[in-house]
Image (spheres, rainbow, N blue to C red):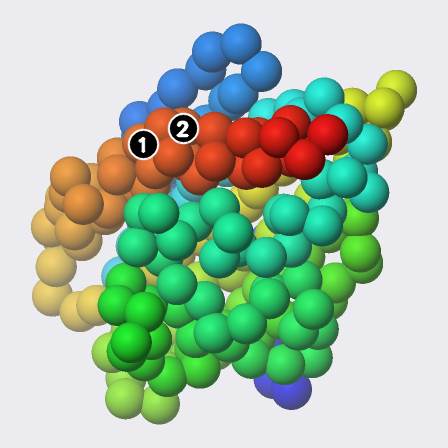
């Protein structure tokens, strides 16, 4: 499998970052950042959303729910073709219509149960992202004193030609993109996951 890893791993290209919307309250922290990177092939631009939150239960109790994104994201019309945490080495589809999830666009690179999930989106064959991976995502679970700290890193990008930095970033700054991702995690995904875990115990 050929993977187009993020900048830090490639080691030769370092983007410029701009802080975006964020929210920090009690045990939840969410931050969006925008980035641009000028290359010979065009201007790469995108958004990264990082998050951290705590669930007052051991990782084993959290993992049984966390690994199945359908359990805590369906209410926001995010539908997955399988249990992501059980798909190491396989692919899955994600769509907003449960009857039409679209193609298998995500590769689950590595899963360590109760510890982490690594997901990569290969470069689309149709050239829709300008020849770059549209996403790379890492989720970790770290148990300390019977509590589980969950972190997430979600990176999305495209590459274009003939656009200024502001024009390239306008898409990612739009209300339906990074600001909406922050809102969904804060108001819907994280509360739904906590409700599942706490309700079970």
Q: Position of residue 18 (x, y in %)?
A: 34, 33
Q: Residue furthest bottom?
A: 125
Q: Residues within 10 Å of mark 1 (few under 14, many from 20)?
A: some
Locate residue 197 relative to residue 161 in the image: left or right.
right
Quick one: quadrant of the N terminus?
Answer: bottom right
Residue indicated by mark 1:
183
In the rendered image, which quarter contains the C terminus? top right
Q: How many marks?
A: 2
Q: Is residue 10 above or below residue 181?
A: below
Task: Give the side of residue 155 with respect to residue 1, left or right.
Answer: left
Question: Residue drawn 47% across and 74% down?
Answer: 81
48 to 69, vertically: above or below = above
Name the residue: 71% across, 50% down.
Answer: 64
Q: Which residue is mark 2?
A: 186
Instruction: Return the residue nearer the eye: 15 or 72.
Output: 72
Q: Residue extending furthest right?
A: 145
Element under label 1? helix
State the image coordinates of residue 44 (x, y, percent, origin top left). Answer: 32, 60
Q: Residue at x 57, y 30 (%)?
A: 194
Mark 2: few, some, or many residues within 10 Å (few <14, many ≥20)?
Answer: many
Taking the image as drawn, is residue 143 in sight?
yes
- C-beta proximity under 8 Å, tags 2 and 1: yes
């Amino acid at each position: 499998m050929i993977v187009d890893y993020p900048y830090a791993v490639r080691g030769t290209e370092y983007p410029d970052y701009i802080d975006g919307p964020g929210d920090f309250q009690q045990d939840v922290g969410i931050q969006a950042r925008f980035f641009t990177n000028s290359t010979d092939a065009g201007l790469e631009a995108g958004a990264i959303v990082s998050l951290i939150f705590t669930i007052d239960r051991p990782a084993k109790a959290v993992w049984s729910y966390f690994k199945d994104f359908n359990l805590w994201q369906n209410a926001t019309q995010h539908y997955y073709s399988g249990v992501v945490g059980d798909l190491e080495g396989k692919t899955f589809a994600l769509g907003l219509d449960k009857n039409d999830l679209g193609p298998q666009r995500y590769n689950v690179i590595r899963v360590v149960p109760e510890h982490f999930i690594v997901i990569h989106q290969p470069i689309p064959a149709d050239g829709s992202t300008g020849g770059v991976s549209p996403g790379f995502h890492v989720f970790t679970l770290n148990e300390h004193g019977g509590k589980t700290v969950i972190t997430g890193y979600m990176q999305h990008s495209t590459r274009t030609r003939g656009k200024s930095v502001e024009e390239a970033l306008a898409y990612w700054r739009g209300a339906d993109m990074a600001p909406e991702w922050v809102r969904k995690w804060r108001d819907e995904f994280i509360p739904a996951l906590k409700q599942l875990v706490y309700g079970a115990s």
